[in-house]
Image: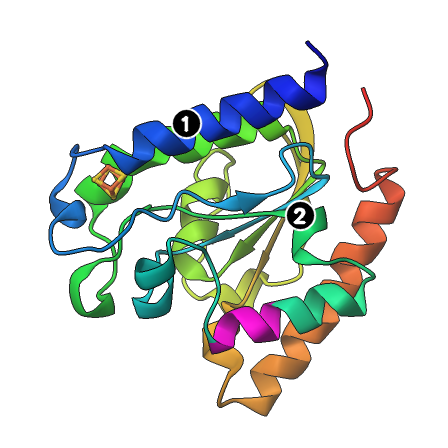
Amino acid sequence: MAEETESNVAIENLAAVIGECRKCPLWENTHHAVPGEGNPRAGLMLIGEAPGKQEDLTGRPFVGRAGKLLEGLLSGIGLTRDDVFIANIVKHRPPGNRDPRDEEILACTPYLEEQIRIIRPKVIVMLGRHSSRYILSFLPVEFDRITEIRGTVYPALLFGHPVRLIPTLHPAAALYNPGYRESLEEDFRIIGRELAAAGNSTRQD
Ligand code: SF4
């Protein structure tokens, strides 16, 4: 079996497990799990916080207005959704879009970690404070506000594979804030450069 097929199957099998998961109460009153989607051998993985209303209704990540903004940012560095893998740190929508709780993040992040192990991205972009805090907890990096660290490139060894970790703002925060939007565009230029420096955007090995 070719590796591409193995990665596809592994991601799909994991999505099926996530769809049946009851490890925390977040699944209650949701329509769909939102495991994540995209290229299972992507060089670039983007990690948001949690599904919102549109994502819950469709089972797909970043499909609302923030998703459109994200697609525009990807387009600016020559990529589409099909080139990357997009996921969240929790896979079911928190009620009323509240922040995910520590125990929910603890219950759910083994799925994200497994996705990272399967995909082995060269660059991981953390969209917003929650995913940045979680992923950077593997490094000795602490911060109070995402604006302190956004656009910084952290080379790391994550689950045995070299990767560049780049925190940035959550696209939803930029919907009504032109200054944040400029910051996101600036950070995506850095992301494009780092991805190019890391080689082909899709894993070939
Ligand atoms: S949020 Fe994660 S841990 Fe909680 S039920 Fe959904 S998939 Fe399971």
Q: Which residue is drawn at 36% across and 68% down?
A: 54
Residue 146: where, in percent of width, then height?
49, 64
- The one nearer the camera, 158 or 117, is 117
Q: What stretch is highlighted in magenta?
A: 65-70
- The one nearer the camera, 78 or 144, is 78
The reply to whether callout 1 and callout 2 are in contact (CB within 8 Å) is: no
> Counting residues from the N terminus, which is met first, the one under dot 1 or under dot 2?
1
Q: Can residue 158 be seen in this snapshot?
A: no
Q: Can residue 150 be seen in this snapshot?
A: yes
In the image, residue 30 sits, relative to residue 27, either above or below, namely below
The residue wearing badge 1 is: 14
Residue 87: where, in percent of width, then height?
48, 47
Residue 103: where, in percent of width, then height?
18, 40
Q: Which quarter of the figure has residue 64?
A: bottom left
Magenta: predominant secondary structure element? Answer: helix
Question: Could you tell me the amino acid type at mark 2?
Answer: Val
Helix, strand or loop status at disc 2: loop
Viewport quadrant of the N terminus: top right
Q: Indicate how the structure is coloured in the image.
A: rainbow
The residue wearing badge 2 is: 84
